[in-house]
Image: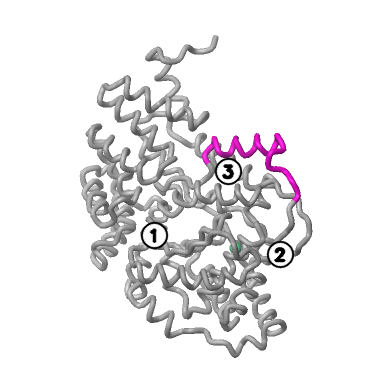
């Protein structure tokens, strides 16, 4: 499975510091302990406490939502998704978790959950659902992952942490050594790293729980079969648009067959419950009207992944002719132009994106890159500052602020940022670069 290598998204993973903290804390036995599996009632070895699950969620989910072009600006649709999710969440095994549900602007087909209960669905998947029962199946499945504590389980086994480390290593290895190529090197970071770790057994369990929850919440479990059928067909017809979903939620015809069997054998009496087709259609009418634009976004994204920038640019032009103020369309177009080294044009789209969705991080990040490439370091610094404020804790923003200060010949201020960066990140090319500068400028005495 080929990852999208031309994606400027931030890597929504644990920061290295957080990761080291978790590993050392676990090694020191601070987090180790047995807890009761909320589903089976059995005692399980769990290295990650519930508090840690919530903390990891809080530290990482905002970056993933931003990488997915932010929460949809259609507040009515977003609260419909949230209310539907909350209704189901109250009937789960862990009703007290701080659940929240939202739709993000990304066009690819996906849904995901962070361990504290922050759950997202993409525009791409919503336009392919037929009724509220299918939506409840999707949210129920994600709630299944949170309730069975799959992320914590993967972390306890070391599966997740090694995946995260692998991601960082692959990134550092592939990265360009010259910082004149920052935009290109950032393109190596794909999204969804923290999420890519469920096993097939996890999927089976999340499916079983999802069906239980949605049936209990009053939905016809046929919605679960409908969802599985859609995903199965998409994986054959449009594999590119659904790739990430399959890398995070392993899929097969088996899941469709199991869902059909379970509805028949276990939930037959629930089939009298409604699927709420009209309610879903009403709430998603505006979004569904944009389906052609969302499909163009998917095509543009997939062409960009193959390195066909001209073709992807054409798809993004179509998107913007259909929906001129589409934030994801504007940011993707800007990235596509940036990769082609058309900095002024890229900046134009990034500026429009900033106006369309004030305060969202990616438009500032991309505008910052375009400015930096044009050597407008002062303006670039300002953009990276806004980017850091929009996504506190994103160490990349700190590095680029230092880099811009350096470009402005403000070495003292630059050193402050590089020092902050090194507090957060101890390894990688950027850390090596920051360290080298601090040594050159006499702020650090190199060890002999
Ligand atoms: Zn899953």
Tell me, yes or no, whether the highlighted magenta stretch contains residue 21: yes
Residue 257 in the magenta stretch? The answer is no
Tell me the number on the disc at residue 164.
Answer: 3
Q: Is residue 368 left or right of residue 47?
A: left
- The answer to whether residue 415 is above or below residue 279 is above
Kindly indicate whether the residue at mark 3 contacts the one at mark 1 (C-beta within 8 angstroms): no
Indicate the secondary structure of the residue bearing disc 2: loop
Q: CA distance from mark 1 to mark 3?
A: 25 Å
Main SS, magenta residues: helix
> Which tag, 1 or 3, sits closer to the chain's start?
1
The magenta region covers 15-34
Mark count: 3
| Residue at which label 2 appears | 39
Q: Specify whether residue 280 is in view.
A: yes
Specify the quadrant of the image occupied by residue 375: top left
Contact between marks 3 and 2 (CB within 8 A): the answer is: no
From mark 1 to mark 2, how far is it between C-alphas?
31 Å
Foreground tag (1 vs 2): 2
Q: Is the CB of mark 1 within 8 Å of ligand 1?
A: no
In this rendering, the label closer to the viewer, 3 or 2: 2
Residue beneath the point at 51% across and 58% down: 118
Decide: is 113 above or below 281: above
């Amino acid at each position: 499975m080929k990852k999208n290598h031309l994606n400027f998204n931030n890597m929504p993973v644990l920061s290295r510091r957080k990761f080291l903290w978790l590993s050392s804390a676990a090694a020191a036995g601070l987090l180790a302990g047995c807890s009761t599996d909320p589903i089976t009632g059995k005692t399980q070895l769990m290295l990650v406490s519930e508090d840690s699950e919530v903390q990891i969620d809080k530290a990482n989910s905002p970056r993933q939502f931003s990488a997915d072009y932010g929460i949809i600006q259609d507040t009515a649709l977003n609260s419909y998704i949230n209310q539907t999710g909350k209704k189901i969440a109250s009937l789960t095994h862990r009703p007290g978790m701080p659940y929240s549900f939202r739709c993000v602007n990304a066009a690819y087909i996906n849904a995901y959950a962070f361990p504290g209960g922050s759950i997202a669905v993409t525009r791409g998947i919503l336009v392919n659902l037929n009724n509220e029962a299918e939506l409840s199946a999707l949210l129920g499945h994600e709630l299944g992952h949170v309730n069975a504590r799959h992320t914590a389980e993967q972390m306890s086994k070391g599966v997740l942490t090694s995946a995260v480390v692998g991601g960082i290593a692959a990134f550092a290895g592939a990265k360009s050594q010259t910082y004149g190529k920052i935009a290109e090197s950032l393109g190596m970071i794909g999204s969804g790293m923290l999420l890519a770790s469920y096993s097939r057994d996890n999927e089976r369990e999340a499916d079983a729980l999802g069906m239980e929850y949605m049936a209990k919440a009053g939905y016809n479990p046929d919605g679960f079969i409908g969802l599985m059928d859609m995903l199965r067909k998409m994986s054959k017809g449009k594999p590119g648009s659904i790739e990430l979903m399959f890398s995070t939620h392993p899929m097969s015809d088996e899941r469709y067959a199991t869902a059909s069997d379970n509805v028949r054998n276990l939930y037959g009496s629930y089939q009298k419950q409604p699927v709420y087709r009209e309610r879903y259609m009403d709430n998603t009418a505006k979004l569904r009207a944009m389906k052609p634009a969302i499909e163009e976004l998917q095509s543009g994204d997939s062409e960009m992944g193959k390195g066909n920038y001209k073709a992807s640019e054409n798809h993004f032009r179509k998107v913007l002719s259909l929906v001129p103020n589409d934030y994801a369309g504007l940011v993707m177009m800007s990235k596509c132009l940036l990769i082609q080294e058309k900095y002024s044009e890229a900046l134009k789209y990034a500026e429009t994106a900033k106006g369309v969705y004030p305060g969202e991080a990616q438009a500032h990040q991309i505008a910052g890159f375009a400015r930096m490439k044009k050597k407008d370091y002062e303006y670039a610094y300002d953009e990276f500052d806004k980017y850091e404020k929009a996504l506190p804790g994103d160490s990349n923003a700190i590095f680029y602020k230092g880099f811009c200060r350096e470009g402005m010949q403000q070495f003292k201020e630059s050193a402050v940022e590089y020092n902050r960066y090194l507090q957060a990140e101890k390894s990688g090319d950027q850390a090596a670069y920051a360290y080298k500068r601090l040594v050159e400028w006499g702020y650090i005495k190199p060890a002999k």
